Image (cartoon, rainbow, N blue to C red):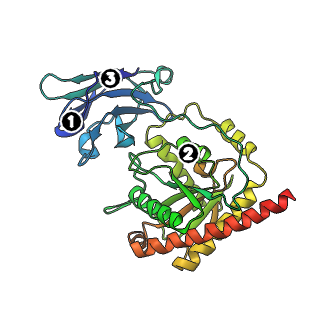
Amino acid sequence: MAAHAQEFTGLARVDAARSGVTDLRAGAELRLGLSQPVPFRAFTLDNPRRLVLDFSVVAWQGFDAAGFDRSVAISDIRVGTISAGWSRMVAALDAPMKVASAELRTTGAAELVVALEEVSAEQFAASAGAPPSDNFTLPEPAELVAPRARPGGERPVVVVLDPGHGGIDPGAERGEAVEADLMLQFARELREALLRAGGFEVVLTRDADVFVPLEMRLSVARSAQADVFLSLHADALAEGRASGATIYTLAGEATDIASEKLAERHDRAELLAGVDLSQQDDAVAKLLMDLARADTWPRTDRLADALVEGLRSNVGDLHKRPRQSAAFSVLKAPDVPSVLIELGFMSSERDLANLQSPEWRARAARGIRDALRVWAKEDAAEGELLRQ
């Protein structure tokens, strides 16, 4: 069941004293005290089971998920921006429960009350899914277009920069440092460096603190007819120690256990952000891989090698194994050379200091710029040879 409220406008704030989740005999009740009424929708998603609440718009500053959730029916809560004009709460459900009712009370202080009722797993699966909404829309995924000729001559190199995470998915966090913010800042600085150098067109998958679903990130690259797709990240390790930048390319199997776990964490962000993956399966991924043109793989390898050399020349020490591979879903655009750049580890004090240093970021941007110049020149020459 999906529920919708009467439409209002404005930015609402959460009143913690009037908000919380409590268990009922056969379900749970979620109450959210708001400073004013706002449009909302409530629905559930399966695999894993989640309750999703979308608002236009709620400001989550100062929201305390631990203090808000006092139930056993809900095991985890995330909040954040999901797209322009919409914010989201995602609650992990420990048992199958449907939205029995969802009411935005406007008599007196505004309050959203969502009643959850336990149902069978079969009933939950049948009712789960995001409802259609005229007020909540994302751009349609772009169709796969015929690739252009390789860059060369007067045509600029089209670079799509993908600052990882954003909005409801902050990525790694260390103290006040947030991966999503750091990567957006670096993407903007790298864009400026490339545009100043000339010979590049640059497109960002996001230019604000919003969550962009994986499919839309790939869609941006296709729509732009990108020559290169660079996904920017900065991981943090819960165990062990690692430091330095790493360049990842796509592979069916990871080069090591750490790379495999990293790819799993990146892809898990889709679920934590409340993305409905029920219509996607391995057959779709396999089809995309089968569509990949035969020359994309060696071009990607040359791009990764150039990035390693460019970064090493400009920032010095990289990870002890700077070239690695893993099954990153964000790298599965079939006809665009795509790499994921882990600029460093936020769990490393040195790397975190580098990521927060304008001087270090400028050197890293120069390294990537130089690498793209070298790669584009070699790629154009290779393409010319293939046409002869």
Give the side of residue 98 with respect to residue 303, left or right. left
Task: Determine the CA span between mark 1 and mark 3.
Answer: 20 Å
User: Which of the two labelled residues, at mark 1 and mark 3, occupies the earlier sequence position?
Assistant: 1
Of residues 64 and 188, the one nearer the viewer is: 188
Relative image position of residue 98 (x, y in whole percent): 39, 23
User: Which of the two labelled residues, at mark 2 and mark 3, occupies the earlier sequence position?
Assistant: 3
Residue at 26% from the left image edge and 30% from the top image edge: 9
Mark 3 and mark 2 in contact (Cβ < 8 Å)? Answer: no
Disc 3 target residue: 26
Q: Which amino acid is tagged 3?
A: Ala
Q: Which amino acid is tagged 1?
A: Ser
Q: Residues within 10 Å of mark 1 (few under 14, many from 20)?
A: some
Give the side of residue 29 with respect to residue 130, left or right. left
* SS under mark 1: strand
Give the side of residue 151 with respect to residue 98, left or right. right
- Farthest residue toward the front? 154
Q: Quadrant of the N terminus?
A: top left
Mark 1 and mark 2 in contact (Cβ < 8 Å)? Answer: no
Task: Determine the CA span between mark 2 and mark 1.
Answer: 38 Å
Q: Nearer the viewer, mark 2 or mark 1?
A: 2
Disc 1 target residue: 19
Q: Which amino acid is tagged 2?
A: Val
Q: Which mark is residue 220?
A: 2
